[in-house]
Image (cartoon, coloured by chain):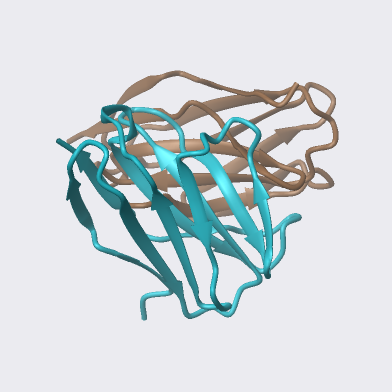
Amino acid sequence: DAMVIQNPRYQVTQFGKPVTLSCSQTLNHNVMYWYQQKSSQAPKLLFHYYDKDFNNEADTPDNFQSRRPNTSFCFLDIRSPGLGDAAMYLCATSRDVQQETQYFGPGTRLLVL
Amino acid sequence: QQQVKQSPQSLIVQKGGISIINCAYENTAFDYFPWYQQFPGKGPALLIAIRPDVSEKKEGRFTISFNKSAKQFSLHIMDSQPGDSATYFCAASRVKLIFGTGTRLQVFP
C-alpha cells in the first residue's frame, strides 16, 4: 500500500561523512521532490526532478546533491554533513508540477554526530 | 511575495469545539491551495485542497473557506477530536508549493 517509501527511517552519520538517503515511489509520478524539515518548521524545498530534468532551489547548498536513475527512485546525497544538516528529510511526488497534490513519504530523520 | 502567512502558531481546543486556522498570501498567481496535516515523526499528508474558482469546500468535518479578493483562506475543523491533534500547514502553489509556518493544534478531551 505504501506509495512513497523512504529508507532508512533513521540515519546517524558523522560530521563530514557522506550520506545517501533514498526514496522510491509506486505512483509512477513524473515529479519527485526533496524537502528538508527542521523541528517546528515548515518543509523547505531543496530540489525537484521533473522526469529527468533537475531543478535546484537557489538557496540549496552545494553540499546537497540528488540523483534520479529512473522514474521510481530518487536519492539525496549529502557530501559533507554538518551539524546544521540534522533534520527530517522528506521525499514527495506529484503527477505534474501545477495544481497537483504532492504525496509525501514518512521521512528520514538524520542525526549528525 | 512568495510568502504564505499562517496563524495562529498554536491552538488549544476542547473536544467537540471548532478549530480555525487562517492563512494569507500575496501572489495572485497562486492557483492551488492545499492543507496538510502532519503527526509527529511522520510526513505531511494532504487533508483538503481548494482552487481559486471556488469559495468553499467541505470534506467531512473539514472545510476550507477561500476569499480571493482578500487573498485569504482558512481551515475549519468542526467537532474537533483528540485524534485531530497535529500540526497543520496551509500552502499555496503555482509551480512550487509554498508552505505556511504551521499551526500546532491540541484538542483536549
Q: Residue at x 36, y 81 (%)?
A: A1
Q: Nearer the viewer, residue A51 or B6?
A: A51
Drawn colour of chain B? brown
Does B15 sit above or below residue B7?
A: below
Residue A108 coordinates in the image, percent (x, y): 29, 53
Depicted A33 relative to depicted A56: above or below: below
Residue shown at 76% from the left, 55% from the top: A98
Rendered image quadrant of residue B71: top right
In the image, A41: left or right of A113? right
Residue A106 visible: no
Chain A: drawing colour? cyan
Q: Nearer the viewer, residue A68 or B54?
A: A68
Q: Is residue B37 visible?
A: yes
Picture quadrant of residue A10: bottom left
What x and y, as percent, mark residue A89? 37, 47
Residue at image coords 30%, 46%: B39
